[in-house]
Amino acid sequence: MRLLLDTHIAVWLTNTPERLSNQLRAAIEDPANQVAVSVVAVWEIAIKRALGRSDAPPLSAHQAVNEFAAADFHMLDVTAPHAAFVERLPLIHADPFDRMMISQAIIENMQLVTYDRQLSRYDVAMLTW
C-alpha cells in the first residue's frame, strides 16, 4: 500500500505513537508499504505555530522535518496537478491543508491515513481507526 499520513498521524507516530491503534501502527510500520508525509504537513505546522494556535503541534516545523526524515517517511511535494485538483473537490471540509492532502492522495493513488472521519465523505481511499 501507498500511505499518505496526515499531519496529526505523522506527529503522533513520531512523538506519541501510543495514540495510534496497534493495527494502524502495524500498517504504517509494514516494510511492504510506502509511507509518505506531504510537505503540506510541514507547512501546516509552521503556520499554526507562527499564529500561536492552541491546536498547533508540540514541535516546530524544523523539528518535524528532522523527525519525519529520521522515521524514513518519503516527503511528498506539492505539484501543479495537486493544486489544480483541489478546485474539483466538493466543499465538504474547509481546511486547506486537509483539502490539499486529499487531492494529493487521489492524484497519487494513495490511502490517506487520518483520524478525521469527516474526510471519508470525499472519494478518497482512507485508513483510520
Image (cartoon, rainbow, N blue to C red):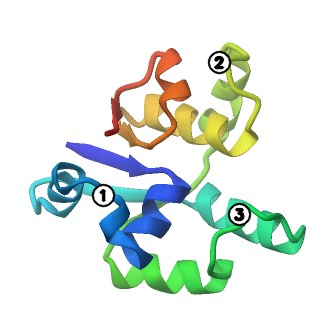
- The quadrant of the rendering that contains the C terminus is top left
**Mark sitting earlier along the chain (3/2):** 3
* Residue drawn at x 40%, y 73% as measured from the top left: 16
Helix or strand or loop: what does disc 3 sit on? helix
Is the residue marked by circle 1 packed among few (<14), some (14-19), or many (20+) residues within 10 Å? many
Please give left or right for residue 70 compared with residue 88 in the image. left
Rounded to the nearest angstrom, the CA distance separating label 3 from label 2 is: 21 Å
What residue type is disc 1 on?
A: Val
Please give left or right for residue 47 compared with residue 71 in the image. right
Per the rendering, the mark at residue 43 is: 3
Residue 112 sits above or below residue 43 on the image: above
Residue nearest the observer in this picture, 27 or 35: 27
Q: Pointer 3 and pointer 1: residues touching (CB < 8 Å)?
A: no
Helix or strand or loop: what does disc 2 sit on? loop
What residue type is disc 3 on?
A: Trp
Please give left or right for residue 29 compared with residue 122 in the image. left
Is the residue marked by circle 3 packed among few (<14), some (14-19), or many (20+) residues within 10 Å? some
* Residue drawn at x 61%, y 50% as measured from the top left: 78
What residue type is disc 2 on?
A: Leu
Residue nearest the observer in this picture, 37 or 128: 128
Per the rendering, the mark at residue 120 is: none
Please give left or right for residue 57 compared with residue 110 in the image. right
* Residue drawn at x 73%, y 17% as measured from the top left: 91
As drawn, the residue found furthest toward the right would be 51
Give x and y (percent) for residue 121: 52, 16
Is the residue marked by circle 2 packed among few (<14), some (14-19), or many (20+) residues within 10 Å? some
Give x and y (percent) for residue 60: 67, 82
Q: Which residue is mark 1?
A: 35
In the figure, residue 26 lies in which quadrant? bottom left
Q: Which residue is mark 2?
A: 89
